[in-house]
Image (cartoon, coloured by chain):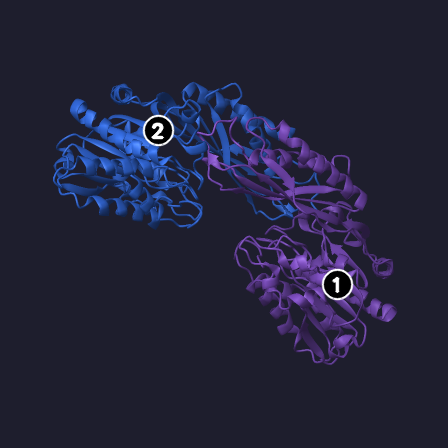
Chain colours: A purple, B blue
Amino acid sequence: MLGILRDLRGITATPGRGCTRLAYTHFEDQAHDLVWSRLRTISGLVREDDAAGNTFIVPTSALGARKPILLIGSHLDTVIEGGWLDGALGVAAGVSVLERRACDGRADPHVGLVIFRDEEGVRFNTGLFGSTVFAGGCLPSDLEAKAPDGVRVRDVVPDPDGCCEYQPPVHPAAFLECHIEQGERLVATESEVGVVSSIVGIRRVEIVGVGMANHAGTTDMRRRVDALVPVAHVVARCPTLVDGLDDAVITCGRLQVNPGAPNIVPGRVTAIVEFRAQHDATLDTIEGRLRSLVSGVTPAVSGGRCAEIGLGPIVTVAPTPTSDTLNTLLSKILESRGVPFLYLASMAGHDTQLAARRCRASMFFIPSIDGVSHNPDEDSREADIELAGDLMLAWAERCVRECL
Amino acid sequence: MLGILRDLRGITATPGRGCTRLAYTHFEDQAHDLVWSRLRTISGLVREDDAAGNTFIVPTSALGARKPILLIGSHLDTVIEGGWLDGALGVAAGVSVLERRACDGRADPHVGLVIFRDEEGVRFNTGLFGSTVFAGGCLPSDLEAKAPDGVRVRDVVPDPDGCCEYQPPVHPAAFLECHIEQGERLVATESEVGVVSSIVGIRRVEIVGVGMANHAGTTDMRRRVDALVPVAHVVARCPTLVDGLDDAVITCGRLQVNPGAPNIVPGRVTAIVEFRAQHDATLDTIEGRLRSLVSGVTPAVSGGRCAEIGLGPIVTVAPTPTSDTLNTLLSKILESRGVPFLYLASMAGHDTQLAARRCRASMFFIPSIDGVSHNPDEDSREADIELAGDLMLAWAERCVRECL
């Protein structure tokens, strides 16, 4: 586990500042290639990239969906200045299983690896893109999502049309993933493993304020139309929108001011607000509160004429339960080994939730030190990383016996 | 007037999106060169650039401060996607006076032009830099101001040491400037000219929020340290800080979120707040209110641990009265011609306020259509532009007779 994880950490756009491998960049490509260069020595394995650029490393006998197989995987893209384990851990566990299941240099015909593209959604403001394609859920509009530099998803995927009319290169009977927790619940409960019972629903929306750029000195307070002030009102109040909703979080992580000069009244401001919860009803409540806040904020803003403020389309990922069958197999392994574990709901989105639309799917977590993630300080104990590989092997073996 | 203004408009980084000639870029250099290429045909004029790169186009007899002269001028840098008249109008008026005062192709020995550098302060977040050097007010720390790309002022000025130990190349007896109003007071009062009785004081400060970047899903509301929420609270309340202060404005025109991804809790946020008023006492009141707001906001923020929020050093430009003597000369001209005019205080900073530290200085405004400025739509009526040239000539002639 540690060897390949360290090799992957070595590929980055910003040495010394964590890992930066944005989706569909040379750095992400290089990470996919690194995994294949390691597994290609096992005979009977083949690499097949799909329309979205997801990499499948699978037994040749499984190609063309001839025989159902077990897929293990995760993603290798990162956020900007992210950590070394987010995504990479699950890929490393898959590599480890493929290597340890190989017999006399020949691949196990029942198990394959998948590496999904663009899980993080940083570049195009769309998360879980590769696994969405795998799930058969890619819409033509998803291909038009644009990065700040104007590049669209359709400009970078190998086969845009094939993303929307998708056939997976193999027939998956089940999908397994492991991941760092990115939170502190395992540490707080002295658990070594978290079995994920469901994965959070996410809604993401752009707040747009449209005012009028003008001179910050000569445009008096009554005459100005400042796009930032009402958006700042909304952003400042966002935390209150999840008051009383225990399992929910809300974040504004991106806010852009145009033209962005200290002596110009802001003419256009965009802010992305994202909220998460385990149930659609909770997401509906938050969305309703956000709509009230946005429609009510303008009259409350002191000084100036009212800048227009509105919400763009809501990007939605539905809350997803994982497979009870797979979870039961894993919990039996954990019980038999005496590993303390917890069932928990994931507050992070994961490829597993999309894979679940195509086959049985589930995942487990190992503890994150101090709960830190999406940060160069992201880390886990070496013993926990090795345990992830061991558990994934045992879980895969049980699945092959009982689910194929 | 219109010919040279249109030529200057042709120099820009962003065709079709107004004028962009940031300080110390090739575009600003080209604008200075264009003016000199037009005036060099008048014999007896010489170009001399000072330590800050301010361009002086003056009679050779005035060089080395041998004979006091009248200086007319303004600046040629712009904001990003700004208008075609801000600064350029005053330079064009100076060009027009030098051309019309020349006799048989020989320069008037009493009048010169100065083009100041970096009036807008967009690139290095320091305004009025060139005229500050001319005023003898440049501090070593001013040279360390840094653009977002890491370039410092000292890297771009021709002679950093000479900026702080400054001797002007000529001895100015008076400085005259004309400028667009960038507001609507002239139009509202049906005035054709505004005689500027004083120039606004400006204070600019960076608000810094320091939290901890972390995963926006797995970091629950109580555990997160969001740097944006408290800064947004301050920015949203900024307009209230000038309540009851009629002549004051406050603006946050720049706000930057790091790392800036929708699914990461903001770890560091900076916002620049600028406020302006005609009196130091008013500026003190606003600064006091801002300090209270910043120190009081954190406990009020809902959800999450407290991000640290603080204020950087305050950049100050003092309020400045203009020369009564010069204003009286100009008002007599306006009265004798029957031009409706207004005495007013300028809410924009101008090079005149720095020139006033070295000699008598004043300025006048012509109306801005709809009060728009720092915007590609900035404009004035052609008749008003031509009037500016005529008035500057008459004012300069009176000054030469009565002030030299």
**Percent x, y of residue B35:** 26, 44
Q: Quadrant of residue A109?
A: bottom right
Task: Judge whether A402 appears above or below B59 on screen.
Answer: below
Res A368 visible: yes
Q: Secondary structure at mark 1?
A: loop
* Quadrant containing the N terminus of chain A in the rendered view: bottom right
Chain ID for label 1?
A
Residue annotated with mark 1? A136
Tally of marks: 2
Residue B361 got which mark? none
Res A391 visible: no
Q: Is residue B90 left or right of residue A139?
A: left
Q: Secondary structure at mark 2?
A: strand
* Residue at image location 13% in from the left, 37% down from the top: B103
Task: Judge whether B55 appears above or below A338 on screen.
Answer: above
Q: Is residue B38 left or right of residue A269?
A: left
Chain ID for label 2?
B
Residue B365 got which mark? 2
In front: A265, or A86?
Answer: A265
* Residue at image location 72% in from the left, 53% down from the top: A349
